[in-house]
Amino acid sequence: MSRFRIETLVPVVLGALIAAVAPAAAEGITRIQQADGTTQVYHHVMMRLSGRTLWLRSGDHRGILEVTSGACRYLDGLQRCLPYQTVYHDHGVAHTIALEHGTVYTNTTGENVQLPHSADRLGPHEVLVLLHTMRGTYVSVKGTLDQIK
């Protein structure tokens, strides 16, 4: 699949990934703002952290977004990593999403942790993902991890 087709699928793919209305244990919100300014907000995403890979799965288990990070730094219980690969999995087919830049913050402690240069905090076992795709789409995810390995 060409890079253009993959990148134009980002809003559709991420929307389908997160739009499931089935109840889930996750307490998360995902916001997708496309380059044209349109915004979608989705609730109830299952989140699992396995090493440096964050897995975001729709409640209906149809789609999975895999965000793999590196270059991690720890600050007072807060892990800050730079994502270097984002892949959407749909029925066994993987689609790479090209990123311009991004950051993954993870609080793996049982306490609230202050975000650097911000008044905001991440609660126990919360994650904050900020992504900017090559096509100009902004994706933000904030919620509580369902599982940490």
Image: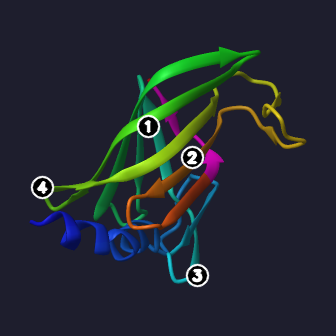
Residue 124: x and y, percent?
73, 32
Asked if residue 104 is positioned above or below residue 5 in the image, the reply reads above
Residue at 53%, 60% (x, y): give it: 139
| Mark nearer the viewer, 3 or 4 | 3
Circles 1 and 2, Cβ within 8 Å, touching? The answer is yes
The residue to which callout 4 is attached is 92
Q: Secondary structure at mark 4?
A: loop
| Mark nearer the viewer, 3 or 2 | 3
The residue to which callout 3 is attached is 37
Q: Which mark is residue 129?
A: 2
Residue at mark 1 to residue at mark 4: CA–CA distance: 22 Å
Circle 2 Cα neighbour tier, 10 Å, few/some/many (<14 / 14–19 / ≥20): many
Residue at 43%, 73% (x, y): give it: 15
Residue 138: x and y, percent?
53, 63
The residue to which callout 1 is attached is 83
Residue at mark 3 to residue at mark 2: CA–CA distance: 19 Å
Circles 1 and 4, Cβ within 8 Å, touching? The answer is no
Would residue 85 be found to the left or right of residue 131 on screen? left
Question: Outermost residue, left direction?
Answer: 1
